[in-house]
Image (tube, rainbow, N blue to C red):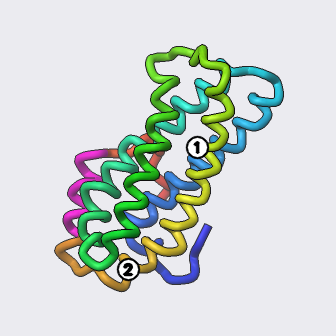
């Protein structure tokens, strides 16, 4: 994804970006599962995506977004609303169950298309703007939330 503004030099943004990359990788496995009619596999992938997004969303909504909402209230509210719509569809596959609603695979694919667009909005808009707008205290708050939320991804080699 994006590397033009230097925002990935911040550990917080780098981790959010790595999570985006993992989510995009997981999304790429949905189409073959859908084509095979393998709804159970789609549900498994949905759970994997939700696991990555859990701490990711915490960092955004409790660290990054509140600081950004001061300058960009409508944009942040729209991103949070997208989080809710995406989470609702992913939640249908919670608890190792395969959704029985025959429309769920279609809803999942629509939600994942929204998620891909959402990721681009964050990486091309929110992250570079955060680099320009946030001060040390805000970044420290984001780092504190990350420490509390953790991550499902392995740490990159040093």
Magenta residues (range): 140-149
In magenta stretch: residue 145: yes
Considering only vertical position in the picture, is 1 above or below 149?
below
The percent coordinates of residue 127 (x first, y second) are: 44, 72
Q: Give the distance between the C-alpha atoms of the residues marked 1 and 2, in whole angstroms.
A: 28 Å
The percent coordinates of residue 78 (x first, y second) are: 41, 61
Considering every residue shown, the one lying at the far left of the view is: 137
Of 65 and 139, which appears nearest the observer? Answer: 65
- Residue at 35% in and 61% down: 77
Please tell me how crowded label 2 is: few (under 14), some (14-19), or many (20+) other residues with Cα within 10 Å.
some
Residue denoted by label 2? 131
- Residue at 60% in and 18% down: 101
Considering only vertical position in the picture, is 125 above or below 90?
below
Of 59 and 94, which appears nearest the observer? Answer: 94
Residue denoted by label 1? 111
The percent coordinates of residue 122 (x first, y second) are: 48, 66
The percent coordinates of residue 16 (x first, y second) are: 44, 58
């Amino acid at each position: 994804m994006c590397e033009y503004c230097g925002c990935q030099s911040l550990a917080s943004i780098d981790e959010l970006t790595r999570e985006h990359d993992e989510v995009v990788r997981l999304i790429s496995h949905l189409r073959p599962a859908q084509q095979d009619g393998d709804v159970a596999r789609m549900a498994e992938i949905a759970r994997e995506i939700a696991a990555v997004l859990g701490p990711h969303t915490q960092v955004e909504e409790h660290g990054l977004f509140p600081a950004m909402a001061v300058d960009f209230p409508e944009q942040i509210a729209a991103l949070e609303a997208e989080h809710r719509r995406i989470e609702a569809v992913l939640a249908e596959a919670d608890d190792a169950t395969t959704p029985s609603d025959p429309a769920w695979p279609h809803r999942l694919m629509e939600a994942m298309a929204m998620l891909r667009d959402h990721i681009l909005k964050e990486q091309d808009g929110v992250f570079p703007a955060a680099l320009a707008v946030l001060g040390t205290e805000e970044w420290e708050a984001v780092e504190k939330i990350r420490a509390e939320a953790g991550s499902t991804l392995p740490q990159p080699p040093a």
